[in-house]
Amino acid sequence: MLPQLVLLLLSGVATHVKATCKAPNGTETQLAWKPCSNGPIFYHNISLPDYEDRKSYPILATKPFTVLANITNNGEEYDNVETYMKLWKWGGWFGCSWYRVPAFGVL
């Protein structure tokens, strides 16, 4: 009886958190991004087309997607450009906040 009660309580808490934890700044329907350095590259726009080159949001991280960036480079020329990305998700069990989604080196 106790395990069923705990499971029922946890599912009720999860439902309540999901219902009251609305994502900020329209991020439920559109991509939010920000550069994390003050380097010579200025990002104008970033989009995430899916594997069929369609704009879609939210992304399905279980399928391939491409990151397209419209940038201006005010510095030196770069060869073999690589990037590092972090994924974040809004929500949580103990209040609404951003938490990092582990990518395990894939991004």
Image (tube, rainbow, N blue to C red):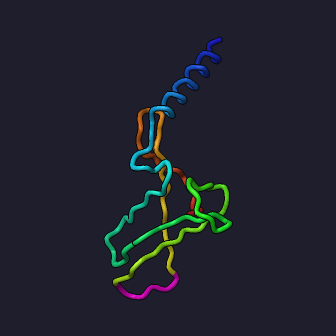
Q: Is residue 60 left or right of residue 34?
A: right
Q: Residue at x 59, y 62 (%)?
A: 106
Residue 23 sits in quarter:
top left
Magenta span contains residue 83: no
Q: Residue furthest left?
A: 38
The N terminus lies in which quarter of the figure? top right
Locate residue 27, reporting x and y percent: 46, 50
In the image, the segment drawn in magenta is 75-80
Q: Residue at x 53, y 71 (%)?
A: 68
Q: Nearer the viewer, residue 72 or 1?
A: 72
Q: Nearer the viewer, residue 59 or 84?
A: 59
Q: Is residue 19 left or right of residue 4?
A: left
Relative vertical location of residue 4 with respect to residue 84 in this rendering, above or below: above
Locate residue 80, reporting x and y percent: 52, 82
Relative vertical location of residue 56 with respect to residue 44 in this rendering, above or below: above
Q: Residue at x 51, y 75 (%)?
A: 82
Q: Residue furthest top?
A: 1
Taken as a whole, is the magenta stretch helix, strand or loop?
A: loop
The C terminus lies in which quarter of the figure? bottom right
Number of labelled discs? 0
Locate residue 61, reporting x and y percent: 62, 56
Q: Is residue 10 left or right of residue 70?
A: right
Q: Nearer the viewer, residue 1 or 48?
A: 48
Locate residue 37, reporting x and y percent: 35, 68
Q: Is residue 96 left or right of residue 12?
A: left
Q: Nearer the viewer, residue 92 or 23?
A: 23
Magenta span contains residue 76: yes
Q: Residue at x 54, y 29 (%)?
A: 15
